[in-house]
């Protein structure tokens, strides 16, 4: 039997990159997937791929994760459509800036916290009652080595991702008695954001690959998503509050992140 047969999942930011890869992989493992995505064209494209290529159930809900009502609606939509919500993947991110700490604005920092921490807080609170009732739940939150290593020029992202790690570990501690586990993935993947960075700073991107023991950025669907499948499955029932570095070994010595800024 497929690892996620009969499960229903909400995945934020599933229109592209890691979110899309996880959505497709979950569908291949039997899950019904709600794509919670701000970009309607990309979100609907992911749904159509899942339906047409994989033959699985999928729905799209337009979701701006900076809005609590929109996040609540995504979770409620999953329950309305399938009668349950078993898995929530908090992946959405957007709106950051590569700039020096002294140049960061209050609005930028608030935005980072809203997208990176509050959106997950809202989705986790919304899903908790359903998971508690069924004594089963899986929260998978996407964080980053950027935060762990305090990489330069991405303060709002670093703070948001480390805040999300703390939130996840706290949920893991408090909700474990209810059969709910919460874990973190810190990935290294060849996403659209990474490709844009590689175009902007090719020398730094090349250095990152040289420092990666496996020598390449992972594929969202083939390298990152299988770990999410494991965390979403019964196989991870005794594992909670953990940070998994799915990064080709880049975390072992800590890759350097020092792009040139004027």
Image: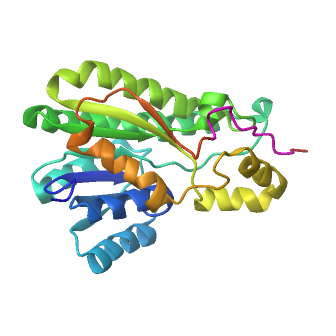
Q: Quadrant of residue 72?
A: top left
Outermost residue toward the bottom in this view = 52
Could you tell me residue 190's position as x and y percent? 60, 59
- Decide which of 21, 252 is in the foreground and name it: 252
Q: Residue furthest right?
A: 262
Left or right of 164 on screen, residue 62: left
Residue that protrudes farthest toward the front in the picture: 213
Above/below status of 153 relative to 16: above
106 to 38, vertically: above or below = above
25 and 58: which is toward the camera: 25
Residue 189 in percent (x, y) is at 57, 54
Percent position of residue 106, x then y: 65, 32
Q: Which is nearer the eye, 54 or 141?
A: 54
Visible in this render: residue 38?
A: no
* Quarter of the figure that contains the N terminus: bottom left
The quadrant the C terminus occupies is: top right
Label the magenta part by its dominant secondary structure: loop
Q: Quick check: can you spot residue 43?
A: yes
What's the residue at 58%, 59% (across, down)? 191
Q: Is residue 161 above or below residue 42?
A: above
* Front in this rendered view, residue 18 or 122: 18
Boundaries of the magenta span: 250-260
Residue 220 among magenta residues: no
């Amino acid at each position: 039997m497929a690892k996620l047969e009969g499960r229903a999942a909400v995945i934020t930011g599933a229109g592209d990159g890691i979110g899309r890869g996880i959505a497709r992989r979950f569908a291949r493992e039997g899950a019904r997937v709600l794509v919670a995505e701000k970009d309607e064209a990309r979100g609907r494209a992911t749904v159509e791929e899942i339906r047409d290529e994989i033959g699985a159930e999928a729905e799209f809900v337009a979701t701006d994760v900076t809005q609590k009502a929109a996040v609540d609606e995504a979770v409620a939509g999953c329950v309305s459509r399938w009668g349950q919500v078993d898995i929530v993947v908090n992946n959405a991110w957007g709106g950051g800036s590569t700039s020096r700490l002294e140049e960061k604005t209050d609005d930028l920092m608030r935005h980072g916290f809203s997208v990176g921490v509050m959106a997950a807080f809202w989705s986790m609170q919304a899903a908790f009652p359903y998971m508690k009732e069924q004594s089963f739940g899986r929260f998978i939150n996407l964080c980053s080595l950027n935060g762990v290593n305090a990489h330069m020029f991405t303060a709002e992202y670093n703070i948001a991702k480390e805040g999300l790690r703390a939130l996840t570990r706290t949920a893991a501690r408090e909700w474990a008695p209810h059969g709910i586990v919460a874990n973190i993935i810190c990935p290294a993947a060849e996403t659209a954001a990474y490709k844009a960075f590689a175009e902007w700073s090719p020398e730094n991107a090349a250095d990152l690959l040289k420092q990666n023991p496996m020598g390449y950025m992972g594929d969202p669907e083939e390298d990152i998503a299988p770990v999410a499948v494991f965390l979403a499955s019964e196989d991870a029932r005794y594992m909670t509050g953990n940070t998994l570095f799915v990064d080709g070994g880049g975390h072992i010595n800590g890759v350097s992140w020092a792009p040139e800024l004027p």
